[in-house]
Image (tube, rainbow, N blue to C red):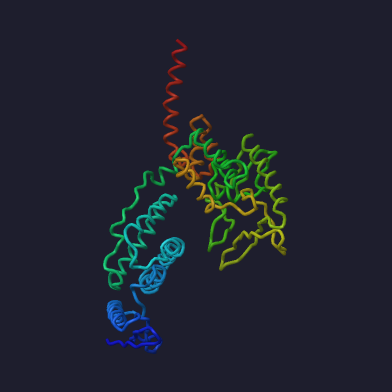
């Protein structure tokens, strides 16, 4: 392949014919420098890069963001299943592009990539989330080496995978001590977006979707009862009400004075915030939508200044100061703070496990615990909390021994 140089004004330019685009030959022309010699050197370099890449752009100049788009189009969309395509695109758009997109592809090195992975680890992303990011980076940069020849080697091969000290199962079954719970509530007190979800989870053992899905109609403060009859879940970036995990999960839970007092204070604060924010306060509405054979209960959030038409207003329990709903996604921030700022191994399920373990170890009726948690079978409760029932059995033997000795 040959190129040409020419002088325009006080600068020298080089040019060459590139590949065919939409049936037409594409000609590339660039500034080569202020002298003919500089332009000839620039032309030789450009031709070499073009020959190596076989593309109509200069691989040495391509950004990580543009390369990721190229990899998605030329490899992922052609070789991966739909769910994998969707997953990879999500990782690229939400993580890789925001953090690494502005770098030139050739500038990526192990240090930059290691810092990126470490930051995601320290931010509290799960092992699976982190593995997805590593998979995308490793796969895309491997493709950049071969067959593309954009870079000479894959810098991800030198990146170390952070060690997770605790598995998800261990965290789920973590029992929060009284001292730890006090630290959590001190960090997220009344008025915080996460205060009331944490209080409800700790005092009822409800699942996170059940807690976030509660409306004030579900709570009877006079009868001291919470009615669990739905969850919220995410679908196509929108939030919906959905059925509980099982039919047994539809239940009424008795609550104590501590939680009642917390709910009353929270409800009063909600009313004050509604006045404080005025027309800018966010109100939720429920709308029934049909998608195929499915009837969906979509949750809309609108400022109170907007006329909702025929939409039915709903009063969510778990809201932020401005009325926006708190969701399982929103709560991830609280989990990261508790884990990495407070140093407490935690996720929302830890509250459920702590609640149930506390009840069983203090001799609550196992059948009542089963109903409270919404387990279909009592065997599930017994299998899950074997450690608690074992501790109780040892205590039971001691009680028996003490009883027969006193008779003597």
Towards the viewer: 159 or 207: 159
Image spot of residue 161 (x, y percent) = 33, 53
Towards the viewer: 296 or 371: 296
Image spot of residue 386 (x, y percent) = 42, 36
Q: Is residue 371 above or below residue 397?
A: below
Quadrant location, the N terminus:
bottom left
Residue at 47 percent of width and 12 percent of height: 407
Q: Is residue 371 visible?
A: no
Image spot of residue 206 (x, y percent) = 55, 44
Towards the viewer: 168 or 67: 67
The quadrant holding residue 5 is bottom left
Q: Residue furthest top?
A: 408
Number of labels in the image equals: 0
Q: Is residue 249 above or below residue 85?
A: above
In this rendering, position of residue 9 left or right of residue 35: right
In this rendering, position of residue 280 left or right of residue 25: right
Towards the viewer: 286 or 50: 50
Q: Residue furthest front?
A: 10
Q: Is residue 375 above or below residue 257?
A: below
Quadrant location, the C terminus:
top left
Image spot of residue 265 (x, y percent) = 67, 40
């Amino acid at each position: 392949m040959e190129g040409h140089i020419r002088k325009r004004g006080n600068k020298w330019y080089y040019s060459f014919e590139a590949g065919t685009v939409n049936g037409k030959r594409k000609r590339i022309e660039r500034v080569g420098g202020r002298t003919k010699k500089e332009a000839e050197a620039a032309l030789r370099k450009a031709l070499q890069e073009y020959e190596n890449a076989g593309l109509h752009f200069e691989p040495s100049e391509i950004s990580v963001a543009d390369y990721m788009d190229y990899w998605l189009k030329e490899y992922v969309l052609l070789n991966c299943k739909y769910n994998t395509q969707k997953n990879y695109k999500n990782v690229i758009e939400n993580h890789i592009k925001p953090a690494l997109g502005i770098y030139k592809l050739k500038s990526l090195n192990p240090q930059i990539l290691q810092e990126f992975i470490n930051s995601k680890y320290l931010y509290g992303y799960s092992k699976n989330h982190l593995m997805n990011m590593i998979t995308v980076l490793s796969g895309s940069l491997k493709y950049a080496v071969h067959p593309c020849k954009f870079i000479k080697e894959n810098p991800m091969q030198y990146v170390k995978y952070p060690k997770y000290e605790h598995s998800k199962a261990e965290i789920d079954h973590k029992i929060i001590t009284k001292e730890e719970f006090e630290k959590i509530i001190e960090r997220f007190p009344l008025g915080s977006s996460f205060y009331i979800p944490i209080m409800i989870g700790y005092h009822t053992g409800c699942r996170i979707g059940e807690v976030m899905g509660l409306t004030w109609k579900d709570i009877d403060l006079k009868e001291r009862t919470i009615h669990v009859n739905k969850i919220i879940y995410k679908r196509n970036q929108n939030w919906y009400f959905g059925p509980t995990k099982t039919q047994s999960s539809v239940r009424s839970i008795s609550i104590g004075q501590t939680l009642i007092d917390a709910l009353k204070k929270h409800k009063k604060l909600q009313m004050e915030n509604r006045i404080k924010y005025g027309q800018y306060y966010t109100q939720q509405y429920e709308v029934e939508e049909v998608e195929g054979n499915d009837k969906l209960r979509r949750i809309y959030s609108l400022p109170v200044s907007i006329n909702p038409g025929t939409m039915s207003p709903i009063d969510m329990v778990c809201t932020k100061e401005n009325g926006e709903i708190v969701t399982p996604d929103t709560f991830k921030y609280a989990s990261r703070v508790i884990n990495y700022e407070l140093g407490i191994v935690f996720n929302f399920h830890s509250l459920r496990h702590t609640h149930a373990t506390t009840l069983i170890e203090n001799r609550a009726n196992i059948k009542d615990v089963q109903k409270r948690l919404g387990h279909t079978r009592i065997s599930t409760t017994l299998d899950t909390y074997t450690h608690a029932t074992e501790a109780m059995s040892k205590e039971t033997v001691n009680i028996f021994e003490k009883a027969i000795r006193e008779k003597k």
